Amino acid sequence: MAEPGALSHEPVLLAEALEALRVRPGGRYLDCTFGRGGHARAILARLGPEGRLYALDRDPEAAAAARRLSEAESRLVFGQAPFSRIGEHARRWGIVGRLDGVLMDLGLSSPQLDDPRRGFGFRQDGPLDMRMDPASGRSAAQWLAEVEPETLARVLRDYGEEPRAARIARAIVRAREQAPITTTGRLAQIVAAAAGYRAGRRHPATRTFQAIRIQVNRELEELRGALDQALEVLAPGGRLVVISFHSLEDRIVKRFFRERSRRITGAPRGLPVAGGPEPGPLRLLGGLVTPGEAECRRNPRARSARMRVAERCP
């Protein structure tokens, strides 16, 4: 049940993630992206008195929700931080190499996306912020005011996979010369005018907003750092479960899993090695998992979700 006054959020691939984590009553687990606690509460429901759930989130509203839950739930230990600091908190908590499962649910929660004050969406006008932690770093408005046109076009192309990146970047630069771009509504209008908007189709600003959000929050760099650290905190047999929501994230996860599961020898290719090659530190479990039609009908935002699972080798 949602907290009073809270915007609702339904965790994606909940049953599949719990099955992949293989939650046992006395286990130790880490939820790297607490959000509004949907996955966390489901994990806690499966833990016994000796089990522990550790959680991280850099969003202050998510942190407030986690702290409220931890006051009533002694098995939850929370730290407010981006998940690129998994290792730091794991050392503080004494759980390096001891976790039975790590869950990463990437992307935005529904409360973040639906709250116009956060600036992530454009269905309602609001300040152009887009920061996961509004107290840290530059807002999207500040970044847009200073970014070079060539860099802006590259970000739209690389992070938004926007085919009209150069045209949209030029339109944004022209508009900011007339007046600062400080609201989501104005940015969406600029992009729509530059790209052409047809009713009934996805809004042309969707890719631009995604790209700028990824840039402002350094989301792909955060993910790369977090994956390496997650591997270090897992115990042998521990599971790493990652849910992503766009192809850029999924490619990073897929490549990481593939590279860490390859056999390694410690010697150049082609040279004989005594005892044969050793397996990599990860073992892939199954293939890509996506939501079923029933979940997608119930929660349309689940349609783009992709889940991958791997296990820490002895």
Image (cartoon, rainbow, N blue to C red):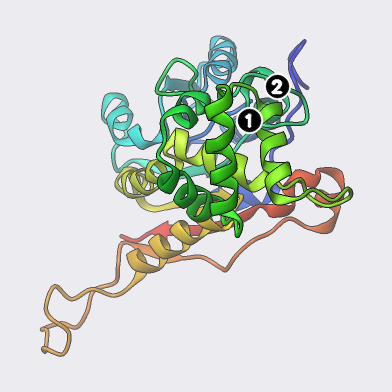
> Which comes before the other along the chain, label 1 or label 2?
2
- What kind of element bears circle 1? loop
- Horizontal relation, residue 215 to residue 171: left or right: left
Q: Are marks 1 and 2 in contact (CB under 8 Å)?
A: yes
Q: From where the camera sits, is residue 33 visible?
A: yes
Residue 248 position in % (x across, y down): 51, 56
In the picture, the quarter occupied by the N terminus is top right
Q: Residue at x 13, y 73 (%)?
A: 266
Residue position marked by numbered label 2 in the rendering: 115
Of residues 157 and 113, the one drawn nearer to the viewer in this rendering: 157
Q: Amino acid at mark 1?
A: Phe
Q: Position of residue 93 (x, y in %)?
A: 32, 25
At horizontal 45% and vertical 21% (from top left) the residue drawn is 77
* Left or right: 278 in relation to 220: left
Where on the picture, by quarter, is residue 176? top right
Q: Label 1, on which residue?
A: 120
Q: Which x, y percent locates residue 247?
A: 57, 58
From the viewer's side, name the closer residue of 24 and 252: 252
Q: Residues within 10 Å of mark 2 (few under 14, many from 20)?
A: some
Query: How far is disc 1 from disc 2 in space, using C-alphas?
Result: 8 Å
Q: Which mark is residue 190?
A: none
**Residue at figure coordinates x 34%, y 61% from the top left:** 313
Judge whether 131 appears above or below 153 on screen: above
Is residue 136 shown left or right of residue 41? left
The C terminus lies in quadrant = bottom left
Q: Amino acid at mark 2?
A: Asp
Q: Which element is circle 2 on?
A: loop
